[in-house]
Amino acid sequence: MKIGILTCARLPELLESDQKLIPLFAKKNIAAKAVIWDDESVDWTEFDYLIFRNTWDYYQKEITFNLWLDKIESLGIKTLNPISIIKKNKHKFYLKELEKEGISILPTIFLEKNSTSNLKELIPESWEKIVIKPAFSAGSYLTKLIDRSELESIQTEFKKHFETKDFLLQEFRPEIKELGETSFIFFDGKFSHAVNKKPVENDFRVQIQYGGKYTLIQPNADLLLQAELVLSKIPEKLLYARVDGIVIENKLHLMEIELIEPDLYFDLADGARERFVEAFLRVTESLSF
């Protein structure tokens, strides 16, 4: 079997933590190599499967990425996670659907592009701080934390963005600074490990590039059931999933379910890469029938 592990031009050989998957696949007689997703010289038909991993520029190349997804789909090349779920998950309005299905999310207003809404009138007066982020984004791209007093200025500053992009407006919860964000990682629907991520002082972003501190944790059984409930709302067969949320009084409030290219924190959990590869074998075996 030959598989391509998808990455981007700035990480042509993959992130180091993902590079270490390649020899593990080799032990299973699977030839795996890093492939830049938008490299036009690639013959995609040579691969039995493509795995989305470090495609971290997709949100900056929205049109190109959408066309590429259509191309891979039309060629009939199998991907993990599948193209159908990639197309849904790349736009964060999927949170609206999950909320309708009973999943607890942070208080959110879904602002469609070209909306004529006045933010000051749209956002509840009880929201003292607001997080603004595009529906099609990653890595805190165009994400801002503002005070309610800044709504008028942000409406002017983001005018062009609001005309061309859908946005999420979320009530900022102080727990993100105090307790951090928790990520539950699953391989083939089975829990692998969980990580707590806390921002540095005077920031709200938990990503490591902004100084976020990551710690391996063991969630209690109730929290794990809540994360599994979120995952159960996704009908597609998944190689991996990362459920991100804020835990407030032992209740998980979903922020995102990452199914495209999340960091899976391989280096923090012993055996995580091996579990990933075993999950790949199980998923592909089930898909071959």
Image (cartoon, rainbow, N blue to C red):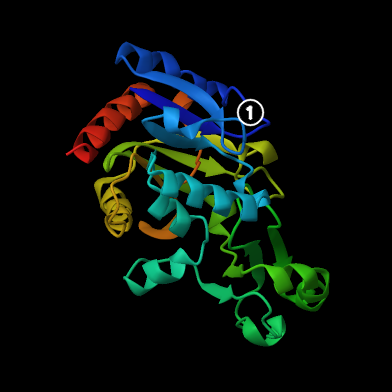
Looking at this view, name the residue that lies furthest to the left: 289
Q: Position of residue 221 (x, y in %)?
A: 25, 47
Q: Left of 139 or right of it: where is 23?
A: left
Whether residue 259 appears in this view of the structure is no
Label 1 is placed on what type of residue?
Leu
Q: Where is the C terminus found, in terms of image quarters?
A: top left
Give percent across and percent down for residue 196: 47, 41
Answer left or right for 133 relative to 47. Answer: right
Percent coordinates x, y for residue 257 in the rendering: 43, 53
Q: Is residue 120 visible?
A: yes
Q: Is residue 263 above or below residue 174?
A: above
Above or below residue 273? Residue 55 is: below
Q: Residue at the spot x=69%, y=45% of the render?
A: 201
Question: Relative to the observer, which residue lies in front, 228 or 56?
Answer: 56
Tell me: 227 left or right of 207: left
| Mark 1 neighbour density, 10 Å: few (under 14) some (14–19) many (20 or more) | some
Which residue occupies the foreground of this view, 12 or 166?
12
Residue at x 38% of width, y 46% of height: 82
Is residue 219 toward the left or the right of residue 202 in the image?
left
Residue at which label 1 appears: 11
Q: How many dots with numbers?
A: 1
Residue at image point 58% right, 69% down: 171
Position of residue 50 measured from the top left corner of the image (x, y, whole percent): 43, 34
Q: Residue at x 33, y 39 (%)?
A: 239
Q: Quadrant of the N terminus?
A: top left
Secondary structure found at label 1: loop
